[in-house]
Amino acid sequence: MMTLHEQATGYKVEIQAEGAERREHRRHDLEQRDLPIDRWDGSRRNTETLGRIVDLSAGGVRIRTSQRNLRPDHQIRVRIELPAYAGICPFVDTKAGDAQPANEWVGWMSIARVWQIDENEVDVAGRLVDMDDMDRGMLGLYLSTQPLAA
């Protein structure tokens, strides 16, 4: 019989009996900055604002939105644009061959949880599943300048 730790191998999840932090990446509070997150269909003219970022980590994001058609286990394509802060750009653009600083990332979010905030809004949390290691590392560095979430 496999232990829970053996079953979680490859997911970088540590299961603690004492209820300790299990996240691989620390969450950072960005709610006060009022940063939008867009639902992305590949065309800027058809992009719709999904909601605003509540907190963000190098591995995932929590969004406050009025859209009610989102469910756990859905995957949605999102666009995150963050301003440079303290001289650090949050992402890296490698499309031209050379790594260049970038302020936006487009990729897939796998929804893990959806919960009601009030009668008009829900919080949606999920993993940023296809972010490459370079972007994840730069986002982690960028977020190290931001306040931690509770």
Image (tube, helix red, strand yellow):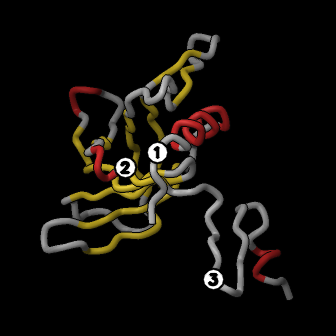
Which residue does the numbered mark 2 point to in the structure image?
30
Q: Residue at x 45, y 60 (%)?
A: 149
| Three-letter code, disc 2 | Leu
Residue 113: where, in percent of width, then height? 42, 70
Q: Are marks 1 and 2 in contact (CB under 8 Å)?
A: yes
Residue 47 image label: none
Vertical order, 113 against 24 (above or below): below
Q: What is the spatial separation of the Cα atoms under label 2 and label 3, in whole angstroms? A: 25 Å
| Three-letter code, disc 3 | Gly
Camera-side residue of 146 and 110: 146
Which residue does the numbered mark 1 point to in the structure image?
146
Camera-side residue of 40 and 98: 98
Residue 19 image label: 3
Q: What is the spatial separation of the Cα atoms under label 3 and label 1, in whole angstroms? A: 25 Å
Which of the marked residues, 3 or 1, is nearer the chain's N terminus? 3
Which quadrant holds the C terminus? bottom left
Q: Are marks 2 and 3 in contact (CB under 8 Å)?
A: no
Residue 147: where, in percent of width, then height? 45, 51
